Image (spheres, coloured by chain):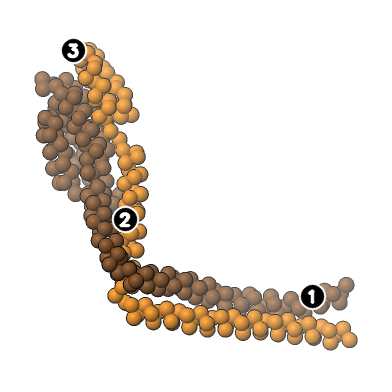
Chain colours: A brown, B orange
Amino acid sequence: MKHVVLLLAAVALPLVVYYNTLGAQRQKQFDQDFMRLKELNVRVEQARAAQRKLSQFHEESARLASERLKLQTILPATMEMDQIHTLVQAKAEDHGVRLTRFDADENQSVTAEVIGGTVATSAFFRDIQNAERIIDVSSVTLRKDPAGWRTDFVMRSYAMTDVH
Amino acid sequence: MFKWLLVIAFIASIAFCAWRDYDAQRNQRQMHADIARDEAELRTNRAIDAEVQAFQKQKGELQQRIDAINQLKQRQKTAADAVAKLSGVEATDIESVAVLDGHNLVINRR
């Protein structure tokens, strides 16, 4: 029994020492090189494919750029509150409601008020919902007004920075 | 006799480790050669590689933006439906109305 243990120890000792020192270093280096090579292989293949179909690649790039531009309108890089104000003002005018308040606070939400009939106000909110920017409408309260209803609400729009 | 067996087992184990290390170094050299070859090819095609990398980056950003827009659209808060309901309500004695959950109305009458 003692002999078997000694024999196993004689076999295991160099293996344990190797795999925990030099072997581990080699493995780490292998993993890094493998990842680098894989990444380079992908880049080489992509470059070859693009080279082979150059005009198609340029068309795709142009399509991507235009798509990006469209989506930047929906979710811009920064809030651009002035754009929202102009947009809301225009939508209000389109539906015959009067925008009487538009106060943006530092949390980038806007306290606003419109005056108009229920149908016009509802259409205005529907248009805001489908606007080119994403705008949440909440905290809506309505009071009677000689011109229909005085509607107070909070709007919240988004920029790409809010999403990250 | 057992002593020799022990020495042979020890030396065989060391030899195995040496072989493994030699093999690992050989693989490493091969991999470095492959990396150098790929890097050289990319240097030759630098312009198209830069274009492709920029394209991939833009594609990633675009997908991120699409995902964000979809998420925001799905949980968008609105009040259009609730306000539309108000047109069918007798309004003479209403003092105020609040929209609840974007769909329901809470009406305070005088």
Q: Mark 3 lies on which chain?
A: B
- Residue A41 tag number: none
- In the image, residue B49 sits, relative to residue A77, either above or below, namely below
- Of the two numbered discs 2 and 3 on the same chain, state the one appearing first in sequence: 2
- Residue A8 tag number: 1
Total labels: the figure holds: 3
Residue type, numbered disc 2: Leu
x, y percentage for residue A93? 11, 34
Q: Gap between marks 2 and 3, in whole Å?
A: 51 Å
Q: Mark 2 lies on which chain?
A: B
Residue type, numbered disc 3: Thr
Residue at mark 2 shares a chain with residue at mark 3:
yes
x, y percentage for residue A38? 47, 71
Q: From the viewer's perspective, is A18 left or right of B26? A: right
Residue, x 87% and y 83% (percent of image)? B2
x, y percentage for residue B4? 84, 87
Disc 2 target residue: B62
Q: Residue B84 appears in which quarter of the rendering? A: top left
- Asked whether the beta carbons under mark 3 and mark 1 sit within 8 Å of each other, the answer is no
Residue type, numbered disc 1: Leu
- What crowding class fits label 3: few (fewer than 14 Cα within 10 Å), some (14-19), or many (20 or more)? few
